[in-house]
Structure formats: structure tokens, C-alpha cells
């Protein structure tokens, strides 16, 4: 992909959702707070817990958020619908319950701008709600410190969830 240096590339974030009422607002707040993120596309695949209403209310005061509906349940269909709707040169995908870092969008944009030959990246993940999360986090730290190549491949460790795959 060629990047036009005269205008910054658009970064779209796709978030598939299904019954995420308990976490979606927190996730949206983290995403819209980032200047590097230009649009957030929430793809609902049949929630019945009020998730679409929460997103609609949030979108009313945050123009970079858009809700679309995908009739086929499941992450693959929702992800693909979001990718089709996205207008960005860069597309990130994350889960509704993911805690993205404050510089997540900037890290993605910087990496792809610096490495235009790269088609996709993903990062290591830690699970904040896993009963064995401390073991996973310990393993991640050991892996990253054992290999400087691993650190650079994960954008210095600032992309924390493998679900944050990029296209």
C-alpha cells in the first residue's frame, strides 16, 4: 500500500460485539480518547442485552463511532462486515472487552507508516480477567526480554491483545 505523505492515513477500528453491555462503554471511551483513531465501527451481531442502545447513545456525542448490524452471529461475520465498512488505509480489530493502551492507535499508525511493506501485525496479549493471567503476563515478559526481535515485532510491547490484529 502506498501512503500519501501529504495527508495522514486513516485508522479505522472494528469492534465486533454480541451482548457486551457491561463493557462496551469503557472500551469506547478508551478508543475515542485517542487522536490517532479516526473511526470506530461497532458491529453488533444480534445483542439482546442493550448493547446497541448503549453504542447509539455513545455515538450521539462521539461522531467517530458508528454502529452497524450484522445478521449472522459470530466474530468472523461481524469482523468482515466491519472491514467492509471501514474507510481507513489502516484497519485495527479489537474485542469489546479489551483494554487498549492510551497510545495503541498511535503505535499502530506509527508502525505501519514506518513499515509500508507490512500487511498485518498482531501483538502479545495478557488477559486481565484470567485466573492464570499472572502466569501469562510472566511468560510474556520473559519472552519479550529474551528476544529484542520479539520486542520490535510487537511494537515495543504496546499492543497487548492478539485480538488486535491489523490488516
Image (cartoon, rainbow, N blue to C red):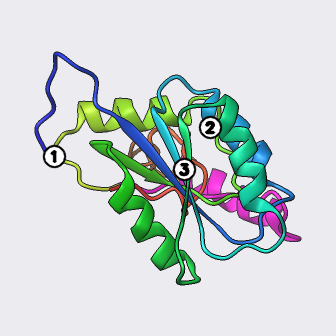
In the displayed structure image, the side of residue 57 where residue 129 appears, left or right: right
Q: Is residue 41 above or below residue 39?
A: below
Discs 3/2, front: 2
Which residue is identified by label 1?
117
Residue displayed at 39% across by 38% down? 11
Closer to the N terminus: mark 3 or mark 1? Answer: 1
- Mark 3 Cα shell of 10 Å, populated few (<14), some (14-19), many (≥20): some
Which residue is identified by label 2?
31
Q: In which quarter of the image is residue 109?
A: top left
- SS for dot 3: helix
Q: What stretch is highlighted in magenta?
A: 121-144
The single residue placed furthest to the left in the displayed view is: 2
Closer to the N terminus: mark 3 or mark 2? Answer: 2
Discs 2/1, front: 2
Residue displayed at 27% across by 42% down? 89
Closer to the N terminus: mark 2 or mark 1? Answer: 2
Residue 50: % across, % down? 82, 63
Q: Nearer the viewer, residue 59 or 19?
A: 59
- SS for dot 2: helix
Q: In which quarter of the image is residue 34?
A: top right
- Mark 1 Cα shell of 10 Å, populated few (<14), some (14-19), many (≥20): few
Which residue is identified by label 3?
144
| Position of the N terminus by quadrant | top left
Q: In this view, does 90 lie above or below 78?
A: above
Residue displayed at 68% across by 58% down? 96
| Position of the C terminus by quadrant | bottom left
Residue 148: % across, % down? 43, 44
Distance (Cα) linking label 2 and label 1: 26 Å
Amino acid at each position: 500500500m502506498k501512503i500519501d505523505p501529504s495527508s495522514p492515513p486513516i485508522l479505522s477500528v472494528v469492534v465486533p460485539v454480541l451482548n457486551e453491555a457491561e463493557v462496551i462503554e469503557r472500551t469506547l471511551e478508551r478508543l475515542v480518547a485517542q487522536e490517532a483513531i479516526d473511526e470506530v465501527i461497532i458491529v453488533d451481531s444480534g445483542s439482546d442485552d442493550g448493547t446497541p442502545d448503549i453504542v447509539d447513545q455513545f455515538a450521539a456525542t462521539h461522531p467517530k463511532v458508528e454502529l452497524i448490524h450484522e445478521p449472522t452471529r459470530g466474530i468472523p461475520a461481524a469482523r468482515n462486515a466491519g472491514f467492509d465498512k471501514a474507510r481507513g488505509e489502516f484497519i485495527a480489530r479489537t474485542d469489546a472487552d479489551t483494554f487498549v493502551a492510551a497510545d495503541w492507535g498511535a503505535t499502530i499508525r506509527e508502525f505501519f507508516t514506518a513499515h509500508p511493506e507490512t500487511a498485518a501485525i498482531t501483538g502479545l496479549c495478557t488477559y486481565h480477567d484470567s485466573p492464570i493471567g499472572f502466569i501469562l503476563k510472566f511468560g510474556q515478559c520473559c519472552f519479550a526480554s529474551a528476544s529484542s526481535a520479539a520486542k520490535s515485532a510487537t511494537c515495543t510491547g504496546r499492543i497487548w491483545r492478539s485480538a488486535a490484529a491489523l490488516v
